[in-house]
Amino acid sequence: MPAKDRKPALLAYLKRAILTTELRPGEDLDEVALCAKFGLSRTPVREVFRDLDGLGFVDLRENRGPRVADLSHTTLRDFFLAAPMVYGAILRLAARNAIPAQVEALRGAQDAFRAALRNKGAAERALANNRFHEITGDMAGNTYLLPSFKRLLIDHARIGMTFYQPQTNEMAANLSEASHHHDAIIAAIEAGDEAAAARLAEDHWNLSRHQIERFVMPKALDVPMGSFSRSSPA
Amino acid sequence: MPAKDRKPALLAYLKRAILTTELRPGEDLDEVALCAKFGLSRTPVREVFRDLDGLGFVDLRENRGPRVADLSHTTLRDFFLAAPMVYGAILRLAARNAIPAQVEALRGAQDAFRAALRNKGAAERALANNRFHEITGDMAGNTYLLPSFKRLLIDHARIGMTFYQPQTNEMAANLSEASHHHDAIIAAIEAGDEAAAARLAEDHWNLSRHQIERFVMPKALDVPMGSFSRSSPA
DNA sequence: AAAATGTGTTGTGTATACAAAGTGTATTCT
DNA sequence: AGAATACACTTTGTATACACAACACATTTT
């Protein structure tokens, strides 16, 4: 690989691996291993770490190796407090400011998402979904809202990877509903309908939240009492 | 100075200098000059630049020196779009979550602000005000809201330094009104009154906005027509 | 004379070597 | 045997040297 592309390649790899939880939350990152893997010296690798720390992908601790940013219970709560508000504002501004080229890009991202829904695994799905929402962020184009929004997107992808594996038909149905939301979002943005866009933002998060609530507190199994054997010692 | 404190000192200096516009928006930063000034080699200095880039203090461009983050007209507009919403949410959460020790810290910051109002210059005032609002951010303690809020605070300080110089009695009166807002904010947080806190957030921004509008579009001078001489060629 | 290109200088990007801090293990002492 | 300490090893932080890219100015060419 040309020397010039190695640093961007490392950055892209880490972003992708963290978003898809290929590198799991809290996991240690090995500096020298990544140096070897990407043919870089420690200096540029550490600069990438610092960039990713600023973006919220990794945590940098003094005299200690970098870790993939954690996903604790408190962050999950914070997430659902902040997300509807921020995403509502983003979509509102997107409806107000989007230019045709961006709408085209959004359509492309949605096509890719639909394709991932059909043919690809959870990781590709999460990345495609992430790309879709990133574009809405670009459309809004507000310097002050974007940092928080981008952090939300990082953890949205990672939360999705842990909680949003469609093992049941109901979950699969949710995914296709999410896809329909995307279509409606595109329409609202193209029409410049801010109120509709804001409403869709809220709907979209409610879908995610219900999905996760269902995962964390699944329906009780419909099994007669006493049918679980208790072989392990108390 | 002990070698261990040099890097934090550089970080603190740059933050302060940028907030007070001692280093002006868009100004170039000289790497080697700062190395000499703080007794550091280029490596740690560049790491500090990257940190500040992530925090929104500095812009880092490829193969080009770092610049103090710009304050353009578009950012001013973006600012007043995002600030009321974000700060409303922050104060709401602060009222919900603040612990007594934090309320004490906030009181201390307000004392410092009042003192700066009496004895100190614009820079100290801006820093004290900044500190006050930073603490409300800590109180809210929401991982996702904080990045945007911190960026807003950076530019709030810098906007204040350019637009909020109390050259008239009216402006001075505004400053003391801001100080009363702070007192009311402390009371609302201590009482856990979320609605009041949210309302105060909005009031506080309106004060800032009116101040700036007045600066950008000052009252017409009360001078008879024709009294301006036109000596320069058309 | 104007434009374009070459060269020198400045400053950024990367590699490597060295220093310091942290961690784990083994040994010793109680 | 258990605990504490010392020592070795691993990993992070910093400094310096080198490579490369960008900019400015001068020179040349049309």
Image: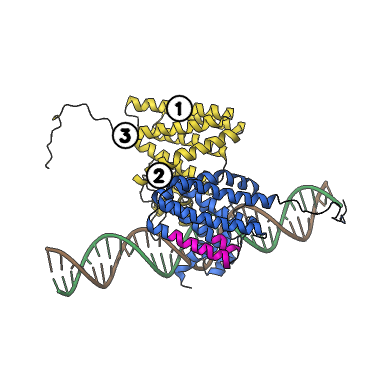
Chain colours: A yellow, B blue, C green, D brown
Q: Residues within 10 Å of mark 1 (few under 14, many from 20)?
A: some
Q: What SS does tag 3 mark?
A: helix
Indicate the amino acid at tag 1.
Ser
- N-terminal label among 3 and 2: 2
Indicate the amino acid at tag 3.
Phe
Disc number lying in front (3 or 1):
3
Q: For residue A109: magenta?
A: no
Q: Looking at the image, which is closer to me, B66 or A171?
A: A171
The residue depicted at 48 percent of the width and 61 percent of the height is B109
Location of residue B167 by image quarter: bottom right
Q: Which mark is residue A179?
A: 1
Residue A111 appears in the rendering: no
Residue where numbered disc 2 is placed: A78
Disc number lying in front (1 or 2):
2
Q: For residue B107: magenta?
A: yes
Tell me where the magenta segment starts and ends, as one range. B105-127
Indicate the amino acid at tag 2.
Asp
Q: Looking at the image, which is closer to me, A78 or B108?
A: B108
Chain bearing tag 1 is A
Q: What SS does tag 2 mark?
A: helix
The residue depicted at 45 percent of the width and 36 percent of the height is A127
Residue where numbered disc 3 is placed: A215
Chain bearing tag 2 is A
Chain bearing tag 3 is A
Q: Is residue A109 above or below residue B80?
A: above
Total count of labels = 3
